[in-house]
Image (cartoon, grey):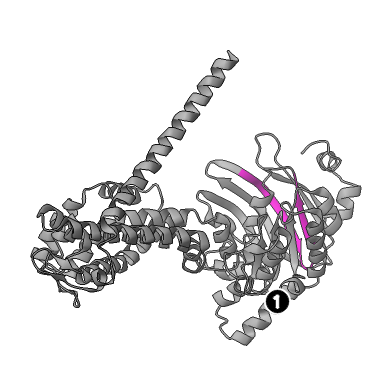
Amino acid sequence: MYRWRKFINNFFIGLTWIASLVVAAVLTYIILYIAAKGVSYVNWGFITGWPKGFEARGGIFPIIVTTFYLTIFSALLVTPVAVGGAVYLTEYSHPASRFSRIIRFAADTLSTVPSIVYGIFGFAFFVVYLGFGWSMLSGSLTLALMILPLVLRSTEEAILDVPRGYREASYALGATKWQTVSRVVLKAAAPRIVTGIILGMGRAFGETAAVMLTAGMAINLPVSVFDGGRNMSSHLYLLATEGISLEAAFGTAFLLLMIILIFNLSAKRIAKRM
Amino acid sequence: MVSKAREKIFEVKNLNLWYGKHKALEDISIDIIKNAITAIIGPSGCGKSTLLRCLNRMNDLIDGVRIEGKIYFEGKDIYAEDTDVVKLRKRVGMIFQQPNPFPMSIYDNVAFGPRLHGVKDRDRLDEIVKTSLEKASLWKEVKNKLNQSALALSGGQQQRLAIARVLAVEPEVILMDEPCSALDPASTQRIEDLMVELKENYTIVIVTHNMQQAARVSDYTAFLLAEENQPARLIEYGETGQIFTNPRDVRTENYITGRFG
């Protein structure tokens, strides 16, 4: 009996160990594969140059700029709305009220909607109806909508995790509700709020469908918010599907992977340090 | 019960309190004497903290709390419509069981209250931080690391920081809700010494389940008891010496001699 129990125990420990090994192996394989195919293509000229000729040789500088433009702009748009909404939900509305339940349900539903749906909405509403055209503005607004549920919910959780004692200590010193929220609660929740925003930026950074339909596909160095542009994922998609250059596609993919890795690592770092 | 010669700062009259439908306090009347330490003792869950938190209206933060009766602070009803709760809490500070230092520097923790109330001048803030930390007997230990995070202090230091933080807003009363129950004996000793120093200038009300502590530091003791399925009542209130040596009620005697609780 004892030996059997011991066998079962070890058997399942072994299974979980194998499962985690598979996860690690698959991840490593993907990264190494893309790195092996793409790393030789990435050099200083690739980062700072413009695409040239039929095979898109040369660099992807305007594409990198477009990608960062969209990512940072959408983060700037989403942050006040997400933080304001989360503060309202956690501090001002009753958590069980119909209104806040509807908002939470909507946010959770929206976060699982495929990005192409955001793309088609952004195209119809921002690009056509509001007349913003294929632009940084249309693209960033669409991306902001897309990452809003993620940032809203992570901010909400960050605020809910602030110990009750901080609030009580603040009120007991004669702070008003707003002083408590702005000087204690948001300050204590800041690292996790920033982490949520960075993770949202990571999603915006790698987005394809929602961007192609709203910021366009033109290779262009955007300056004004009404300029269009092509981001890295769209570029990668076009290179691969049109059969233009698989090498350039892997170069772009490798760079994209590296930047997203940096996003995630810095999100972790900030969460730990602050 | 309590000698009339001393000035009272709080007058609680026929206080009843409910959490939703559950009645927690029944018909409590008690006078809190100025510049003295009043201890509220009683078994766990008997409503000591609830009563304490009525005095600076911290119970307002909890959903479903309803009170009846009057509490006068310096003659003014604090549950009256026109009470400025923010002003009340500035005058009636509170120390909790957990020190709860804010996740900021030692300096910013102490300067938090004065800043809330509009002190911006750097020299003035420096002065307030220094004197508050001195009064809380923490200055010597932290004067060279005011800009370090308050979270790095030990538990006892954090509780003295919490006291400095309250002193910085210049309250008249300090409510203490089991301030030593998370501390080691040496830190407890320091807080108790500090309380005795502070009563020269402040009125202190302390909730404690530690009877020795009540006997050591307080001038007056109130014994609260919730008998089975009943809301808490004030069983006995008087000078600490009398309560501990010559209790009038048999239930007080049973409690202080350790027969229950």
Q: Quadrant of the N terminus of chain A?
A: top right
Is B100 in the magenta? no
Which of these two is toward me, A206 or B249? A206
The residue under the point 70% across, 79% down is: B130
Looking at this view, name the residue that lies furthest to the top. Answer: A1
- Identify the residue shown where x is 38% and y is 37%: A22
Residue B59 visible in this rendered orientation of the protein: yes
> Which residue bears the numbered disc 1?
B144
Task: For label 1, count other residues whose C-alpha is less than 10 Å away and answer few (under 14), some (14-19) or many (20+).
Answer: few
Q: Is residue B36 visible?
A: no
Q: Residue at x 52, y 25 (%)?
A: A10
Quick check: A106 left or right of B198?
left
Q: Quadrant of residue A243?
A: bottom left
Range drawn in magenta: B24-42
Say left or right for A191 vs A153.
Answer: right
Quadrant of residue A56 in the image? bottom left
Q: Is residue B235 above or below residue B36?
A: above
Estimate the x, y position of residue B97 in percent, counting from the top left. Answer: 68, 54
Residue B230's x, y, as percent? 66, 37
Query: Which residue occupies 49% across, 62% down?
Result: A185
Q: Position of residue A88 (x, y in %)?
A: 38, 59
Q: Main secondary structure of the magenta part?
A: strand
Left or right: residue B154 compared with residue B241:
left
Residue farthest front in this picture: A40
In the rendered structure, which amino acid carries the disc numbered 1? Asn
Is A247 left or right of A32, judged from the image as shown? left
Q: Position of residue B43 (x, y in %)?
A: 74, 42
